[in-house]
Amino acid sequence: MKCFRLPALLIAVALPAVALTGCNSAPAIRADLSPTTDSTTRSTEQDYNDYARIIDHNTRGAWDDASRILLLDKPSRLSPWVIP
């Protein structure tokens, strides 16, 4: 009978501890069921990588557009003579 006291004591102590602490995380889980995804198919990191790539591409395009507007992209062809 003595060998059943320790397991019974462990169960008597562990069961209330698990019952009281295990339910505290339920609201946090319900608040965000998919913490690693922002959309239905892509993770947050994939979205950040896309945003960085898009901003880089658009910024480089803006510099190209500014060069064309200011006529800095190639020499003018207004003169009929070759200018070295």
Image (spheres, rainbow, N blue to C red):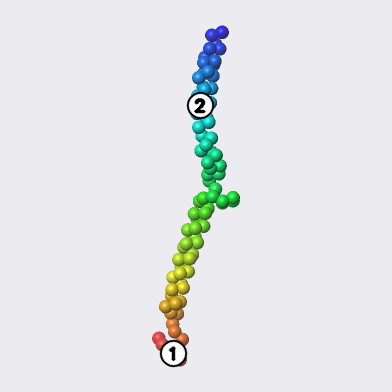
Question: What residue sits 44% from the left and 84% below the top?
Answer: 76
Q: Amino acid at mark 1?
A: Ser
* Helix, strand or loop at mark 2: helix
Question: What residue sits 48% from the left and 65% below the top?
Answer: 58
Find disc 2 in the rendering and name its residue.
20
Q: Is residue 72 visible?
A: no
Q: Position of residue 25 (x, y in %)?
A: 51, 34
Vertical position of residue 25 compared to residue 19: above or below: below
Instruction: State the mark number for residue 79.
Output: 1
Vertical position of residue 59 compared to residue 29: above or below: below
**Precedes in sequence: disc 2 or disc 1:** 2
Question: What residue sits 49% from the left and 58% below the top?
Answer: 51
Q: Position of residue 21 (x, y in %)?
A: 50, 28
Q: Is residue 54 visible?
A: yes
Q: Position of residue 1 (x, y in %)?
A: 56, 8
Q: Amino acid at mark 2?
A: Leu
Pointer 1 local density, CA inside 10 Å: few below 14, some 14–19, many at least 20: few
Q: Position of residue 3 (x, y in %)?
A: 54, 11
